[in-house]
């Protein structure tokens, strides 16, 4: 057998073995689409091509979505309000979000972030933000889960948009109850002073893109925005993976 000399040849051998190894692992533990549970082809990530093409996008970055903007209207100033996907109860996006939040599948958030970051970049939004921040979990919840699902999405967005992200600047000071069954006033009181900006952060005149996983009432994002405004940011936009329709 001939001796392997060049780096190129060594890499070629490495990648051939790597692909064979991955194919072997895939044979033993077939990966399935997180949305429809059909087997995935080796080039497919997180979901199959059919589910990818069928993603229920809101396209809120192409045309402002009134039902999304209305959540902030008359409360806090938001430059852009984006939500990538429509969340329907019992639908495929609920399955994806469940895997991301409760079953450790962080790659779902990162991949969706890269995809949506790509959509935003293609529409000319790369230069619109100085920093990406995430809605934080309470530290007890973060300890239990081991990660913040919004950070996963922010990481993917950051890679595609070429904008830095930081998951530690906003701090959640207390745990909150579910917002769903509360009146508007109760929701506001429940969220009052829940978030603060870290003392060491300098957000002066920064254009912030604030990330959360799902938007329902908008009260959580609203509370974060109030905290950010106190830090003298220049403008705030919001983006979530999904929006409850
Ligand atoms: Zn599928």
Image: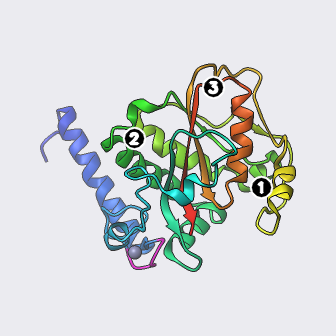
**Whether residue 200 is situated above or below residue 87 in the rendered picture:** above
In front: mark 2 or mark 1?
2
Q: Name the residue under label 2.
A: 160
Other residues around mark 1 within 10 Å, as few (<14) / some (14–19) / many (≥20): few
Q: Residue at x 46, y 43 (%)?
A: 157
Identify the element where label 3 is drawn.
Answer: loop
Q: Mark 1 points at which residue?
A: 144
Q: Which residue is drawn at 69% across and 30% down?
A: 229
Where residue 240 appears, as percent x and y from the top left, is 55, 52
Q: Is residue 106 visible?
A: no
Tell me the distance, in whole angstroms, between the alpha carbons under discs 2 and 1: 29 Å
Marks 2 and 1, the one that precedes in the sequence: 1
- Asked if residue 147 is among those painted magenta in the image, a careful observer would answer no
Q: Can residue 203 be seen in this view?
A: yes
In this rendering, position of residue 182 left or right of residue 168: right
Q: In the rendered structure, which segment of residues is drawn in magenta?
A: 34-39
**Whether residue 25 is situated above or below residue 162 in the rendered picture:** below
Marks 3 and 1, the one that precedes in the sequence: 1
Q: Name the residue under label 3.
A: 233
């Amino acid at each position: 057998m001939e001796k392997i000399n060049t780096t190129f040849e060594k890499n070629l051998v490495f990648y051939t073995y790597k692909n064979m190894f991955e194919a072997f692992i895939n044979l033993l533990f077939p990966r399935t689409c997180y949305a429809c549970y059909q087997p995935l082809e080796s080039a497919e990530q997180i979901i199959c091509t059919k589910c990818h093409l069928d993603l229920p996008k809101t396209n809120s970055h192409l045309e402002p979505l009134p039902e999304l903007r209305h959540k902030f209207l008359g409360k806090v100033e938001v430059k852009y309000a984006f939500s990538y996907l429509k969340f329907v109860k019992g639908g495929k996006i609920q399955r994806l979000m469940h895997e991301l939040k409760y079953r450790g599948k962080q790659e779902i958030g990162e991949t969706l972030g890269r995809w949506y970051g790509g959509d935003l970049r293609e529409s000319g939004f790369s230069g619109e933000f100085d920093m990406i921040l995430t809605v934080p979990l309470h530290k007890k919840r973060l300890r239990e889960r081991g990660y913040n699902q919004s950070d996963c999405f922010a990481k993917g967005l950051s890679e595609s948009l070429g904008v830095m992200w930081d998951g530690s600047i906003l701090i959640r000071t207390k745990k909150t109850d579910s917002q769903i069954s509360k009146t508007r006033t109760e929701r506001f009181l429940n969220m009052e002073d829940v978030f603060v900006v870290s003392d060491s952060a300098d957000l002066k005149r920064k254009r912030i893109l604030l990330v959360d996983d799902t938007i329902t009432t908008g009260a959580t994002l609203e509370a974060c925005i109030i905290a950010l405004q106190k830090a003298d940011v220049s403008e705030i936009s919001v983006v979530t993976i999904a929006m409850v329709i």
